[in-house]
Amino acid sequence: MKQAVIDIGSNSIRLTLYETDGTEFRILFREKIMAGLAGYVEEGALTADGITCACKALIEFGQILRALKITRTAVFATASLRNIRNTKEALAVIEAETHYSIEVIGGEEEALLGYTGAMRELKLCGGVFLDIGGASTELVLFENGEVRNSHSFPVGSLNLYRRCVKKILPGAGSLRRIEKMIKEEMDDTNLLPAERHSPLVCVGGTARAVQSIAGKYFGLPENCRSITAEQLEELCGVLLFDRKQATELILKNEPDRIHTLLPGLLILQHVFQHFEATEMFVSRYGVREGFLCQRLLTKDTDTRKTGN
């Protein structure tokens, strides 16, 4: 059986097509549109142009799925529609135009679904799960195979760029503004406890882009999906403070993220340092796979228990 899942994110809208037998899955293909919906938010509301942009992306994906004769499609939205004041109105227009029923998932639920998806691949017993999106960042602390704490923070790579950066890449003043906003939103001792946790398990476009650039910069094997704390700090030194080399590295490897990579990298660095992590892993699976497992497969997976 083939099942499509569309994720309406704040930075990108993504389609993944799966082959499932009701309990397991394999990915047939992935497609994305860099819609940048967080860039269409004005005074807390998604603008008409932003709604049109979302509609166009869903219609384009619908055409692909019809050509492939895919009849099973589930659509959900994260902070793109959750963190706006006109969620109900935007949702009504998008559903009417595209004929898709869209589920808007909450921040903590997004964190747990992303964690569930990542653990389908990595099956670690302890660490920190981190998903840096365009308008929010989800974090899950887990120990002994069980979730200890989860939260969604209203900072992401695209909304930080819009609020803090005046040019394509942030200068010294922009970097200070971004760091200040990250600390203000995330450094609550009840939500982000100051305890050592490692590794970081990362999903999302920022993490994948950082892994890609690190692979090229350090000459890592193509199948390597981990970065040490030392490697991340060296890479941050280059990307954040050497504008010429940063521009070249991003444009050669992740040109779609020329605006958003550095704000997202600062979130990653902040969490890495906060938990004194020694290593990060980038999972191939994330919130879409968690959504598939929890909502669509006949045998539910245990969100709160992993490993042995």
Image (cartoon, rainbow, N blue to C red):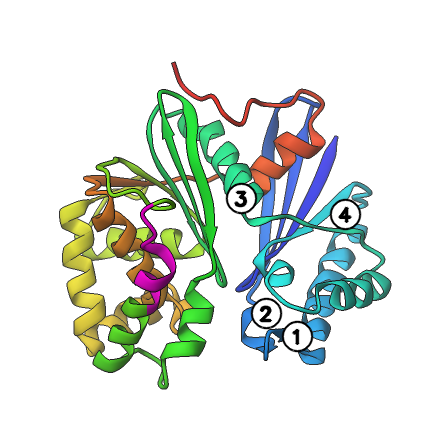
Residue type pointed to by label 1? Gly
Q: Secondary structure at mark 4?
A: loop
Q: Secondary structure at mark 1?
A: helix
Residue 164: assigned label: none
* Nearer the observer, 222 or 245: 245
- Residue at (42%, 65%) from the top-left corner? 157
Residue type pointed to by label 3? Glu
Circle 1 is placed at which residue position?
A: 50
Magenta stretch in the rendered image: 181-189
Give the crowd class for mark 1: few <14, some 14-19, many >=20 residues within 10 Å. Answer: many
Q: Is residue 256 visible?
A: no
Query: How far is mark 1 from mark 2, CA to CA?
Result: 6 Å
Residue type pointed to by label 2? Leu
Query: How far is mark 3 from mark 2, CA to CA?
Result: 21 Å
Label 1 or label 2, whichever comes before in sequence order: 2
- Magenta span dominant secondary structure: helix
- Residue at (36%, 44%) from the top-left corner? 190
Disc 3 + disc 1, Cβ < 8 Å: no
Residue 89 horizontal/vertical position (percent): 78, 68
Above or below 212: residue 3? above
Circle 2 is placed at which residue position?
A: 37
Residue with the most extreme bottom position: 166
Q: Secondary structure at mark 3?
A: helix
Circle 3 is placed at which residue position?
A: 108
Query: How far is mark 3 from mark 1, CA to CA?
Result: 25 Å
Residue 224 horizontal/vertical position (percent): 29, 40
